[in-house]
Image (tube, rainbow, N blue to C red):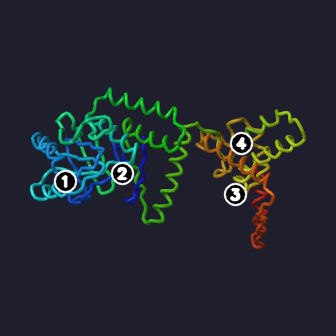
């Protein structure tokens, strides 16, 4: 399922859309047919899909005649619609109430071609101008037009809902995309393939992040985006204990290694100390002694970790304190790469961390340390 984040309300809202949504709106605002929301809405509409730009009136007249004969609205999705074609559509829309809307096809290059093909399969239509086919827009027949139960087009995006495509063909297309996902190594390609897969299978989830100010909405959007990315990473490679516990559980594996020389022994010790840092930092930020927390975690069963919010040792999975495996793995790899770079650098410039001391808070700091120690 694809998630889009949109913040234009006071309250958070989640909308599940059964259909296809893409980020292209109407080409001209004159296609708007409702005063509520500045959008174009149609029920039970035909869809004309074209890879090429449509500029001449003669190109779209046959499709308009078919739609008019069947008393259906017409949605035109093409590389672009301009010139005489656009002028004629707008004029007829304003003067005789022609039920039509023109939308630019989403994406670019091969991605646009693939998305148009997906739309054709989902709606039961054909793509005109497709390479290798001699299908011209002027020769359109009723069976070449896609069919949808509902269409909603705004200035920013368009939704094709309740497509009438053949279920078997849709399932075949889904399997083709899954096979492509298995072989591609490009993260960009994977993202696009997942988007297409979501549109054909589960639809689109729109999360509207609410707030009273732009600052609040943007801050919440960032958190939602982080959570969404973490969830996607978890789907890819699974989850591990959060709070630095997963790294701590790797230390016994290092203890079992037999170093070949003194350098390897030193390297193993450095990594062991490094793996403790995240858990110690979390504990320190919570106002307790990090080394004591790490020692307690290491002595506990494998699923137990430190809940810094509650100040207690808990089952991390049951409490929902987890991290995506991919995030922990890539963070460790990146850290190793940076450490390797630093060992080969001749000079490194860094700041020496300074302990901030506040005389006025000295007594309270001691009390905090005492309370932390009293927990054991």
Secondary structure under badge 3? helix
Q: Which residue is drawn at 73% across and 46% down?
A: 336
Q: Mark 1 points at which residue?
A: 85
Tell me residue 13's x, y (percent).
39, 52
Tell me residue 100's x, y (percent).
18, 50
Residue at mark 2 to residue at mark 1: CA–CA distance: 23 Å
**Upstream in sequence: badge 4 or badge 2:** 2
**Upstream in sequence: badge 1 or badge 3:** 1
Above or below for 146 versus 169: below
Q: Mark 2 points at which residue?
A: 23
Q: Mark 3 points at which residue?
A: 285
**Upstream in sequence: badge 1 or badge 4:** 1
Count neighbours of disc 4 (C-alpha within 10 A) and say few if under 14, some if 14 to 19, many if 20 or more.
Answer: many
* Residue 74 visible, this angle: yes
Q: Mark 4 points at which residue?
A: 247
Q: Of the residues tagged 2 and 1, which is closer to the observer? A: 1
Q: Of the residues tagged 4 and 2, which is closer to the observer? A: 2
């Amino acid at each position: 399922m694809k998630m889009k984040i949109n913040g234009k309300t006071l309250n958070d809202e989640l909308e599940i859309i059964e259909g296809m949504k893409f980020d292209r709106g109407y080409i001209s605002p004159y296609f708007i047919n409702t005063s509520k929301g500045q959008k174009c809405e149609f029920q039970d509409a035909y869809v004309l899909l074209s890879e090429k730009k449509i500029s001449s009136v003669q190109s779209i007249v046959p499709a308009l005649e078919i739609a008019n004969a069947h008393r259906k609205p017409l949605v035109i999705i093409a590389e672009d619609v301009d010139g005489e074609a656009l002028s004629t559509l707008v004029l007829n829309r304003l003067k005789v109430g022609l039920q039509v809307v023109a939308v630019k096809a989403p994406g670019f290059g091969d991605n646009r071609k693939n998305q148009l093909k997906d739309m054709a399969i989902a709606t039961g239509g054909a793509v005109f101008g497709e390479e290798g086919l001699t299908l011209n827009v002027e020769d359109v027949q009723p069976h070449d037009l896609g069919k949808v139960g509902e269409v909603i087009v705004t200035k920013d995006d368009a939704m094709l809902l309740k497509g009438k495509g053949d279920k078997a063909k849709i399932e075949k297309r889904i399997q083709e995309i899954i096979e492509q996902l298995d072989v591609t190594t490009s993260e960009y390609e994977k993202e696009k393939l997942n988007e297409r897969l979501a549109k054909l299978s589960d639809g689109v989830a729109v999360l509207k992040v609410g707030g009273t100010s732009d600052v609040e909405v943007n801050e919440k959007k960032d958190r939602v985006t982080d959570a969404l990315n973490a969830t996607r990473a978890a789907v890819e490679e699974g989850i591990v204990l959060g709070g630095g516990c997963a790294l701590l559980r790797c230390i016994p594996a290092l203890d079992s290694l037999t170093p070949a020389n003194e350098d390897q022994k030193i390297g193993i010790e450095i990594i062991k100390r490094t793996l403790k840092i995240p858990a110690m930092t979390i504990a320190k930020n919570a106002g307790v002694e990090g080394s004591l927390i790490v020692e307690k975690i290491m002595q506990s069963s494998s699923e137990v970790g430190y809940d810094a919010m509650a100040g207690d040792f808990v089952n991390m999975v049951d409490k929902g304190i987890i991290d995506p495996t991919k995030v922990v793995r890539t963070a460790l790899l990146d850290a190793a790469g940076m450490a390797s770079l630093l060992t080969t650098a001749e000079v490194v410039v860094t700041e020496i961390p300074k302990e901030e001391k506040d005389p006025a808070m000295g007594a309270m700091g001691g009390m905090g340390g005492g309370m932390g120690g009293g927990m054991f």
